[in-house]
Image (cartoon, coloured by chain):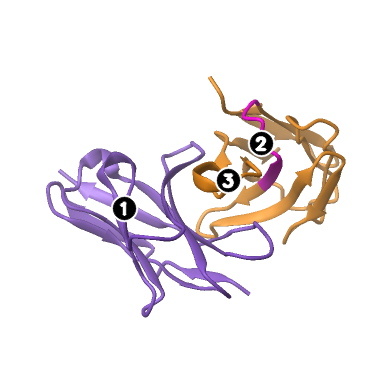
Amino acid sequence: DGGITQSPKYLFRKEGQNVTLSCEQNLNHDAMYWYRQDPGQGLRLIYYSQIVNDFQKGDIAEGYSVSREKKESFPLTVTSAQKNPTAFYLCASRAYAGGETGNTIYFGEGSWLTVV
Amino acid sequence: AQSVAQPEDQVNVAEGNPLTVKCTYSVSGNPYLFWYVQYPNRGLQFLLKYITGDNLVKGSYGFEAEFNKSQTSFHLKKPSALVSDSALYFCAVRGSGGSYIPTFGRGTSLIVHP
């Protein structure tokens, strides 16, 4: 089945440690996104990429890094510089096409990151 | 700048009754409007969208939404609520030009009582 796969579902980070969240899509979508979700705050955009080897900062990029070496993959690294990383992280993607599919962002199942 | 307001943090409704989850927006140009649903510990699922055309949009699971340009609203509705509709609902908007980055509301928790 086509979709967006995020892994792991649950991840624990120690203080000072970098961790990477994986996001893979087999929808042949061009654009990919990372959002952070905190209770009562909705979704906040961390980074997005519209094409391979290019990405832009979102509203809360500090303490995070990404890469886009392949069209289907957009991993997110939460660095030790992110002081409050405990949250639910959502990866999403969108096709570059008009009509029904091109305007809609689709989401993965999310990953929980907890600092221990 | 674009923005979305979901004025109710929580909506309570009895099973079988109609439900409405409110959304108002602000955007330059023509709006593209979306509704998503999120169940606990899951990602967001796309419900429906308005791009152009008929102001009443029908989507998944019996949900519909009405685009009202004069009131800049896009309220989500369902004629008869189910307990299984209990979830977190997000409205999103983006303008028809420029960036394809939508802005999401803070979400409304829908609780359907048996």
Query: In screen coordinates, is A64 left or right of A30?
Result: right
Start-end of magenta stretch? A26-34
Q: Nearer the viewer, mark 1 or mark 3?
A: 3
The label number, if any, that marks residue A29 in the structure image: 2
Is residue A41 positioned above or below B87 on the image? Answer: below
For badge 3, the amino acid type reads Gly
Where is residue A42 drawn, in percent x and y? 53, 57
Which residue bears the numbered disc 3? Answer: A102
For badge 2, the amino acid type reads His
Callout 2: residue from which chain? A
The label number, if any, that marks residue B110 in the structure image: 1
Give the quadrant of residue B23: bottom left
Q: Colour of chain A?
A: orange
Number of other residues with Cα within 10 Å of mark 1, as a class: few under 14, some 14 to 19, many 20 or more: many
Residue in the image at 46% along x and 58% along y: B51
Q: Nearer the viewer, residue B67 or B103?
A: B67
| Residues at discs 1 and 2 in contact (Cβ within 8 Å) | no
Cα distance in 3D space between marks 3 and 2: 9 Å
Do marks 1 and 2 share a subunit?
A: no
Query: In screen coordinates, is A31 left or right of B63?
Result: right
Where is residue B26 drawn, in percent x and y? 51, 75
Callout 1: residue from which chain? B
Q: Quadrant of the N terminus of chain B?
A: bottom right
Residue extending farthest to the left is B16
Q: Colour of chain B?
A: purple
